[in-house]
């Protein structure tokens, strides 16, 4: 199969079933329903209570650019650019606010070692065209007066913003329903069904549901859906993240920008919550909050923003990022005709929502994959495995 150019229409708009009602499934569903397609989302719990609920909502295409992930750069930036229009359209369609904020993001260094590391990151990101300004500690404190007085330096990224992901989820849900989509909550998909290498539908309990196209958008659980040969199962694993929220005094909030420190990031919300995240752990689906995890978050926050010591703790939680083998998303089709992957968004699924929704919904309707999303087909893993086997032989 060509992977990124295929026609699923078979003479009309296909009947589409989406597995998973997180931001990825809901946003694809919304786009399809808007275009008049027959679309059902099957969500085993309540829509949007997976990673989409657990996230910090940063739209961090700039500061999360790292060496080794440059293939993702164009996709991340395309989605970041799409966010303002996407948010405005969604707010209008749903009647819900999503609190897209545009203060920009600060990265801070607490000592000379941090400053050297930050300078390296700054040079690397700047060389890749990211709009960044180097600030002295004093300049950073002009923007955020409660940061530690001994900051060794900082970087301001004007283009990296945030959205309140816990408002995004109900907004997408409402827009999807208003556009005519059908949402089936508390409905777990056990398996996809195929015949002669082609999708025929889903198994839900003892029921068969017919579909021309199935979108696999089950987040960190995407590798667990039965009915696929091993080669068609997406290589997805859960990457555990522990997070917490402190409650700031709204009259005098400790922070107004998103701030990245060497150990944690902090995300202030309009309602006074200060999100502090996040651990990155290979622990399977372990839902435990741990003393070590929470300690490292609080200590990391306190080192750069000492005033957090006085703040009440509002909430602590665990979420599972859907991580693929190369930490990039899996978007588009593979060897099973009619099965479309929209998973593996790892640390940037909120950021990548608009670009994924547009690319996948257009692909289902037209058979053409947007150029920016073409490198993310699942067949890149088959190519790697074959190359490794050839090199071994
Ligand atoms: P999910 O939101 O997990 O949705 C998948 C859904 O599929 C779930 O609701 C689940 O119940 C359902 N499902 C699973 N199996 C089945 C089944 N068999 N049948 C039916 N339904 C099923 N991204 C950013 O862009 N910015 C951030 O700041 C950010 N911070 C993060 C912080 C943390 C701690 C974590 C954990 C993630 C963060 N992310 C962030 C990543 C982002 O949250 C994810 O990439 C994104 O939410 C993935 O969306 P999704 O819809 O694919 O997955
Ligand atoms: N993007 C932030 C996180 O995944 O923790």
Image (cartoon, rainbow, N blue to C red):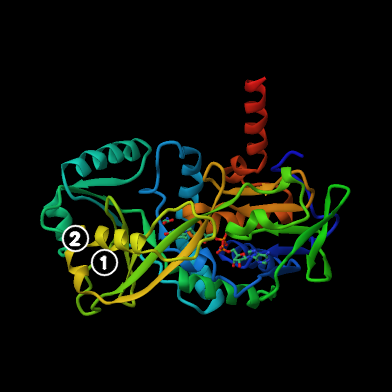
**SS at mark 2?**
helix
**SS at mark 1?**
loop
Residue at 66 percent across and 70 percent down: it is: 43
Between disc 2 and disc 1, whose residue precedes? 2
**Which residue in the structure is indicated by mark 1?**
256
Residue at 25 percent across and 79 percent down: it is: 250
Q: Which numbered dot is residue 304?
A: none
Please, is residue 29 above or below residue 2 in the view? below
Cβ at disc 2 under 8 Å from ligand 1: no
Asked whether, in this view, residue 312 is left or right of residue 343, the answer is left
Residue 40 on image: x %, y %: 72, 69
Q: Nearer the viewer, residue 154 or 374?
A: 154
Task: Report the quarter where the N terminus lies.
Answer: top right
Residue at 49 percent across and 70 percent down: it is: 168
- Tally the numbered discs: 2
Q: Are marks 2 and 1 in contact (CB under 8 Å)?
A: yes
Residue at 58 percent across and 66 percent down: it is: 22
Residue 38 on image: x %, y %: 76, 68
Q: Nearer the viewer, residue 29 or 303?
A: 303
How busy is the neighbourhood of tag 1: few (under 14 within 10 Å), some, or many (20 plus)?
many
Q: Nearer the viewer, residue 97 or 123?
A: 123
Residue 64 on image: x %, y %: 39, 48
Asked whether, in this view, residue 76 is left or right of residue 295, the answer is right
**Which residue in the structure is indicated by mark 2?**
143
How busy is the neighbourhood of tag 2: few (under 14 within 10 Å), some, or many (20 plus)?
some
Residue 103 visible from this viewpoint: no
């Amino acid at each position: 199969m060509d992977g990124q150019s295929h026609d699923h229409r078979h003479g009309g708009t296909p009947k589409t079933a989406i597995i998973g009602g997180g931001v990825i499934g809901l946003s694809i569903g919304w786009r399809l329903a808007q275009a008049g397609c027959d679309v059902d989302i099957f969500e085993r719990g309540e829509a949007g209570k997976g990673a989409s609920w657990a996230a910090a909502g940063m739209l961090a295409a700039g500061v999360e650019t790292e060496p080794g992930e440059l293939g993702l750069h164009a996709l991340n930036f395309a989605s970041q650019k799409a966010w303002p229009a996407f948010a405005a359209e969604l707010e209008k369609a749903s009647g819900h606010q999503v609190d897209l904020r545009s203060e920009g993001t600060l990265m801070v260094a607490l000592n000379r070692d941090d400053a050297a590391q930050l300078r390296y990151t700054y040079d690397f990101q700047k060389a890749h065209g990211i709009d960044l300004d180097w600030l002295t500690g004093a300049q950073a404190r002009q923007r955020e007066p409660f940061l530690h007085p001994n900051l060794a330096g900082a970087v301001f990224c004007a283009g990296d913003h945030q959205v309140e992901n816990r408002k995004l989820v109900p907004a997408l849900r409402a827009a999807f329903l208003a556009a005519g989509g059908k949402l089936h909550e508390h409905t777990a998909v056990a398996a996809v069904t195929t015949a002669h290498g082609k999708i025929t539908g889903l198994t839900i309990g003892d029921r068969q549901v017919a579909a021309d196209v199935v979108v696999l958008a089950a987040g960190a659980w995407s590798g667990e859906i039965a009915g696929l040969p091993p080669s068609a199962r997406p290589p997805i694993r859960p990457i555990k993240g522990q997070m917490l929220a402190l409650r700031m005094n709204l009259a005098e909030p400790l922070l107004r920008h998103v701030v990245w420190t060497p150990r944690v990031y902090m995300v202030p919300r309009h309602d006074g919550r200060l999100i502090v995240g996040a651990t990155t752990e290979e622990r399977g689906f372990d839902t435990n909050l741990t003393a070590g995890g929470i300690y490292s978050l609080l200590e990391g926050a306190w080192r750069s923003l000492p005033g957090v010591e006085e703040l009440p703790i509002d909430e602590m939680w665990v979420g599972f990022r859907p991580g693929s083998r190369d930490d990039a998303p899996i978007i588009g089709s593979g060897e099973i005709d009619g099965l479309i992957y929209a998973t593996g968004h790892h640390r940037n699924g909120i950021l990548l929502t608009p670009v994924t929704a547009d690319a996948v919904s257009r692909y289902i309707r037209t058979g053409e994959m947007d150029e920016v999303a073409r490198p993310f087909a699942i067949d890149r893993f088959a190519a790697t495995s074959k190359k490794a086997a050839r090199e071994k032989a």
